[in-house]
Amino acid sequence: MDELIGHGVRGNGAEIPAIGLGTWTLRDDAASRLVAGALEAGYRHIDTATSYENESAVGAGLRASGVARDEIFLTTKVWPTDLAAGDLQRSVEGSLKRLGVDRVDLALIHWPPKTVPLADSIAALNELRSRGLARNIGVSNFTAALVEQAVTLSEHPLACNQVEYHPFLNQDRVMAACRKHGLAFVSYCPLARGTELLRQAPVAEAAARHGRTPAQVVLRWHVQQDGVVAIPRSSDPGRIRENLDVFDFTLSAGEVAAIDALRSRALRICDFDFSPEWDPS
Ligand code: NDP
């Protein structure tokens, strides 16, 4: 699995580093310091969004790290209020200004549109890609059916679908749709926000067997799956380093099966009144 470090996960031509730093809730100077520290520790993938209100701080962190811009895979997302033609492009242009970069590596529709035709949002996203403001384009929180629609509507290939995924949630259907069309599957809330999941016996027992932490076991579980990327967030520089250090051990088939069985909990953390009708889990 060493190839994951260098090559990342392929999503229709994009090479996405298999572990990225999530930045939701990280703000201001702390966000800059954590992003710079993550890049210095070897991260090459940073995930932000307009709605996180931290793009200026993330941009400052990129510059402070001293890591060359073209070595970093930078993702941002467009909020549902900005998905109409014109609004979407202006949203990403604003992100570029705040981030202090001339393009992002991935621009995502943050949640499927409810008030604008999907075709309009996908066309606007494609225009950004044609203008070189986004090297890759993709979607987030799309169900299997929405992935099918988006793929059909998009002129340029879609690089990924970023969705909630952790051992407490079965996402087989949307994962199958992503694999069918070559999209990378980017897991958000990969640790199910921490404590409860990390205490579960199959996770804790595998951690003890491998001499790793429970978080490392869960992240290993993600990246061992074909086409899966994980973007854990931490406000602790030590944990940020720990979360990247998952490429030199392998979970056995039995360990994976025991962790998979935790999906019976059917826990969905990010569920809002604007969510799509989720795939059955
Ligand atoms: P995560 O599953 O990444 O959990 C974050 C929590 O886990 C924090 O409380 C953190 O605590 C704890 N944690 C992190 N590392 C460790 C560790 N090694 N040991 C123990 N605890 C740990 O949840 P998020 O919701 O942040 O998801 C990750 C990222 O996904 C977001 O930051 C964002 O970038 C993206 N996202 C995207 C969404 C979308 O709609 N597209 C929705 C939600 C998230 P501490 O800070 O104390 O270390």
Image (spheres, grey):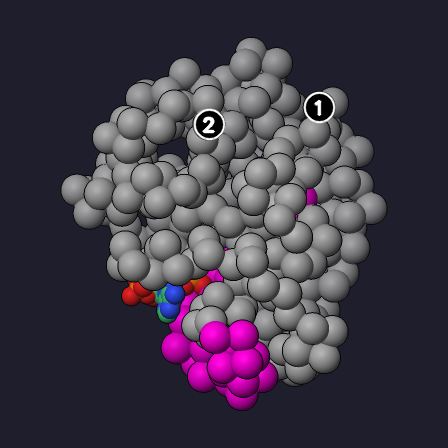
Quadrant of the displayed image that contains ligand 1? bottom left
Residue at mark 1 to residue at mark 2: CA–CA distance: 23 Å
* Foreground: disc 1 or disc 2: 2
Q: Determine the secondary structure under disc 2.
A: helix
Instruction: Return the residue at label 2.
Output: 71
Q: Which residues are magenta?
A: 184-211
Instruction: Return the residue at label 1.
Output: 156
Q: Is residue 261 left or right of residue 186?
A: right
Indicate the quadrant where residue 215 lies: bottom left
Q: Residues within 10 Å of mark 2 (few under 14, many from 20)?
A: few
Q: In x, y percent, where is residue 221?
A: 61, 65
Residue 207, placed above or below residue 73: below
Judging depth in this view, the residue of 235 and 203 nearest the camera is 203
Q: Is residue 8 left or right of residue 269?
A: right
Residue found 36% across the figure and 54% down from its top: 241
Q: In x, y percent, where is residue 233?
A: 38, 56
Which residue is outermost to the left?
29
Judging depth in this view, the residue of 1 and 104 nearest the camera is 1
Q: Amino acid at mark 2?
A: Glu
Residue 148, placed above or below residue 209: above
Q: Amino acid at mark 1?
A: His
